[in-house]
Image: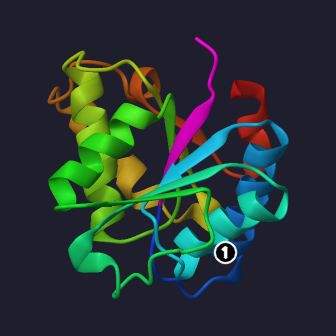
Amino acid sequence: MAITSVAVFCGSKSGNNPLFENHATQLGHILAEKNIRLIYGGGNKGIMGAVANAVLEKEGKVTGIIPQLLTDREHSHQGITELIVVEDMHVRKKMLYEKCDAAIILAGGFGTLDELFEMLTWNQLSIHSKEIFILNTAGFYDHLIAHAKTMQQENFLYDAIEDRITIITVPDEIKTFL
């Protein structure tokens, strides 16, 4: 199946390492150049805002989905192609998953991990078969990946991690999968 839209899950903050935002910008440019629609959380702050703005800089298409309660907190992005305001986080996540062909996880906090693990769980349960990528900028997800390998070694997972997640370290690596 051709990938025409990608959900990007990431922080509404920028983090301490400037490389997080730099990689988000590079990824946004790649998506726009490949004519792949960005589906994301609808904010205009942090890494989330950086990836959306980068897609827009290259005249790409951006769909943001944001729950009403976060429109002020995450500064809903008024300049994107399509902004959808929904009732709550559950509706947001479901819509993000429905509108994407694949997901890319960038650095972020609890919300980013929530989205990653829900996507992984649904994938494992065959609710969907969408590809999931982790952009492991500056080793940000090294500990999480190590923990997932421990879960695999201890026989808590149904499949090998490599069957569910593709880990990349720089944005350019995503090009071979798009």
Q: Is residue 56 visible?
A: yes
The residue depicted at 85 percent of the width and 57 percent of the height is 58
Q: Is residue 150 visible?
A: no
Residue placed farthest to the top in the image? Answer: 1
The reply, left or right, for residue 156 in relation to residue 95 is left
What residue sits right under mark 1 in the picture? 21
Q: Give residue 101's position: percent from left, percent from top.
A: 50, 28
Q: Give residue 114's position: percent from left, percent from top.
A: 25, 56
Q: Give residue 17's position: percent from left, percent from top.
A: 63, 83
* Of 87 and 156, the residue lying toward us: 87
Q: Quadrant of residue 178?
A: top right
The residue depicted at 35 percent of the width and 72 percent of the height is 109
The amino acid marked with disc number 1 is Glu
Q: Quadrant of residue 137?
A: bottom right
The residue depicted at 45 percent of the width and 76 percent of the height is 76
The residue stretch that appears in magenta: 1-9
The total of numbered circles placed on residues is: 1
The residue depicted at 55 percent of the width and 74 percent of the height is 78
User: What is the quadrant of the N terminus in the image?
Assistant: top right
The reply, left or right, for residue 173 in relation to residue 131 is right
